[in-house]
Amino acid sequence: MVPLLLVLLLALLLFGAGFALKALWWVAVVVLVVWLLGFAARSTGPSGSRGRWYRW
């Protein structure tokens, strides 16, 4: 009975990890798109050159 419970627990953990990793991939894709849009749509500065759009 204990090995069966361990196998079921392992399957549940792997399913949960797989779902979390898939969700993290979607979050990474959204962040990449936002970053690329911000990089492409940055405004020009007072001198006419394009500065950094981020603040760090």
Image (spheres, rainbow, N blue to C red):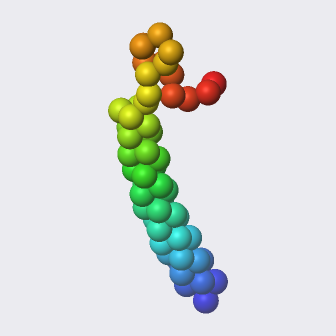
Q: Nearer the viewer, residue 34 or 51?
A: 51
Q: Is residue 38 above or below residue 53?
A: below
Residue furthest out toward the bottom: 1
Image spot of residue 36 (x, y percent): 38, 37
Q: Is residue 40 above or below residue 28?
A: above
Image spot of residue 40 (x, y percent): 36, 32
Q: Nearer the viewer, residue 33 or 25?
A: 33
Tell me the quarter of the image containing the C terminus.
top right
Viewer can see residue 14 = no
Residue located at (38% from left, 45% from top): 33
Tell me the quarter of the image containing the N terminus.
bottom right
Residue located at (51% from left, 63% from top): 20
Residue 32 placement: quadrant:
top left
Residue 49 placement: quadrant:
top left
Q: Across the whole image, how many numbered discs are drawn on residues?
A: 0
Residue furthest out toward the front: 46
Viewer can see residue 13 = yes
Residue located at (38% from left, 40% from top): 37
Residue furthest out toward the left: 40
Image spot of residue 13 (x, y percent): 56, 70
Residue located at (54% from left, 81% from top): 8
Q: Nearer the viewer, residue 20 or 5?
A: 20
